Amino acid sequence: MTEQQRRWFFLLALGVIALYASPLFLLGENAHIRVHDNLDSNIAWYKVLAESEQITGPLDAKIPQIANGQLSRNALGSELTGIVWLHALFPTMTAYALSQTITREVAFIGMYLLLKTHFLPEPRWMAVRIGVSLAFALTLFWPSGMLSTLGMPLALWAFLSIRKGEGKWKHYAALTLLPFYSSFVLGFFFFLAAMGVLWLTDVLRGKGWNIRFFASIAYMTLLYLLVEYRLVYSFLWEDEPTSRDEYFHARLTFWHCVRLTWKNFLLGHHHVMTEHTLFILSAWLMALYLVFVKKRWKQEKAFLFLFALNFALSAWYAFWFYKGWRPLTERFHFLDTFNFARFHFLRPMIIYVQFALALKIIWQYSENGKKWAKRLLAAQIIFVFLINEEIIFRYEPTVKQFYAEKQFQEIKQHIGLPVSDYRVVSIGIHPAIAQYNGFYTLDTYNNFYPLSYKYEFRKIIERELAKSKTIRTYFDEWGGRCYIFTAELGKRYMFTKHSKKRLKNLQLNTEQLKKMGGRYIFSAVPIDNAAENRLVLDRVFTSAESAWTIYLYKVN
C-alpha cells in the first residue's frame, strides 16, 4: 500500500466515523439514544448543573434543584472536564453529538498509533491497523465516560514510547490532554495502576528504574487528581456519610461468579461494549489453533499474553462480587465504596489489540488465511457500524419524547407557582425528566448524596419496601436510585402512555412526603387508591410529542 493509498484509507475511516455519528446531528432531539445511565441521569445533570450557576461553585456548594438541596455540587463532576462545558455551551443534542464524534475520532487515531508503533509496525499490516482501529472507534461506549476507555490506546501508545526512551512532545501532549476529557474513577485509575505494575515488573526483571517512564505515570496521575479535585476533596476531607457507604457488592456464590466470568468474557459488559462475540472471538480461536499447530508460542507470545490477560480481567470482574470478600469489605470499608471490579474496563483496548494480532496470525498463514482475515475484519466493521444507537434503541423514546419539554411546561404553567416553592417526586418515570424540565425534586439518581437524606426519603416508601425484598435490597444496599419505589411496579421506571398498568394498592407515607416539601407526584400510571394515600388527582396531561401520560397528583 502506497503512502497516498494509506492517506485515502485513513481519511475514509474518519469519514465512516462521521457517517456513523451523523444521525445525532441530522435528527437532533428526534434521535434515539441510550436511556440507561444516560438520559435517565448524566444528560439531565449537565443541564441542571449549567442552570444552577454552580459549575465553578465552591467545594461546599449544593445543587438546590435535586434531593431537596442536599446534593453536593461535587457529585456532578469537575468543571475542568470538557463534557461539562459542551453541555453548558451547546443545546443538549449538539453537545452529545459533538462528544460522540470527538471520542470516536480520538479512539481511532489512538488505536492506529498504538498498533503502528508498538504491535504491527510493518507496512504490510496497514489494512489491519486501519480496519481494527475503525472497528474499535465504532464500538458502543458509555457516553459520559468520554475517553475513559476509548482513550486508553492513545495513552498506551504514549507510555510505551516513553518506556522505550523515545518520548517526544506529542506523547506528553497526549498524556496532558486526556485527563480533561475522561474520568479517573471510571477508567484511567485502573489503566494507570496497570502502567504502575508494568513499570514495577520492569524493575523486578532487572531492566532498571526507568525514571522517565515512572515520572510520566506520576505526571498523568497528578494531573487527574487536579482535574478531579472535587472528588479528591470529598474522598479525603468530607466526613458526612453518603449513600455510597451503604453499597454492598459481595453477595454472589462461587459458581455464580464462575458463570459471570464466562458471560463477561464472551459477551462483555454494557458500560464497555466491545461487540466481540461473533467475529473477534472467531478470529481469536482460529489464531490460537494456528499458534499451537505451528508451535509458534514464542513468536506470538504477545497474542497469548493478551488472551490470558483478557480472561483474567473477566474473572477479576466476576469474583469481585464473590460473597467470600464480605469479611474483608466489612473491615476495610473502601473496598465497598470504590468499585475495583472496573479493572475490566481495560478490556476494550485489549480485545481489539488482540484482534489485530489474531488477524496477523491468520493472514500470514496462507492465501486462504489472508482471505479469511479480510472477511473477519470487514464483517466486524459492518457489524459495529450497524450497532448504532439510532438502530438498537429505535424502540425506546426519542430524546424529545423522553424529556417531553412541552408537556412539562404545561404542567409547570398549570401549577402556577415558582418551581422553587414546592418539591415533586415521580412514579413510573425517571426523576431526571422532571429535573431536566426545571422542577425541584426530592427523588434522584445519584450514588453520592447524604446518608441521612436516604433515611429521611426511605420513610416515604417504607411500607412499599416492606412488601418486596427485591426493591428493599436494591434501595437499602445501594440506594443510587433514590426513587419512589412500589412493590407493584418493582424495578421498572419507564411506563409509557401505551401502558395499561395501574397502581391498586399503593401505600406511601404522604405525611413524610409533605414534611420534606413534596406537594406533587408525577405518575406515569393511574393510582386507584389515591384517596387512601391522601392524594388528589389534579389533572391528566397528554401530548403527541411525549412518551408519557402524566397523572398529576396533589398531596392533600
Image (cartoon, helix red, strand yellow):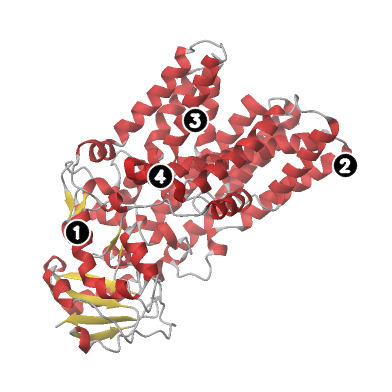
Do tag 1 and tag 4 residues touch (Cβ < 8 Å)? no
Q: Is residue 370 left or right of residue 93?
A: right
Residue 359 on image: x %, y %? 74, 38
> Disc 1 designates what residue?
453
Q: Nearer the viewer, residue 22 or 100?
A: 100
Q: What amino acid is labelled 1 in the image?
A: Tyr
Q: Which mark is residue 340?
A: none
Do tag 2 and tag 1 residues touch (Cβ < 8 Å)? no
Q: Nearer the viewer, residue 374 or 334?
A: 334
The numbered mark, 4 or 2, whose residue comes first in the sequence reads 4
Q: Nearer the viewer, residue 359 or 23?
A: 359
> Disc 4 designates what residue?
339
- Cα separation, mark 3 vs mark 4, equals 16 Å
Q: Is residue 348 visible?
A: yes
* Secondary structure of residue under mark 1: helix
Q: Callout 1 environment at 10 Å: few (<14), some (14 to 19), or many (20+)?
A: some
Q: What amino acid is labelled 2 in the image?
A: Asn
- Cα separation, mark 1 vs mark 4, equals 23 Å
Residue 309 on image: x %, y %? 60, 36
The numbered mark, 1 or 4, whose residue comes first in the sequence reads 4
Q: Is residue 431 left or right of residue 251?
A: left
The numbered mark, 3 or 4, whose residue comes first in the sequence reads 3
- Cα separation, mark 4 vs mark 2, equals 45 Å
Of the two numbered discs 4 and 2 in the rendering, the one whose residue sits closer to the viewer: 4
> Disc 2 designates what residue?
368
Q: Quadrant of the N terminus?
A: top right
The numbered mark, 2 or 1, whose residue comes first in the sequence reads 2
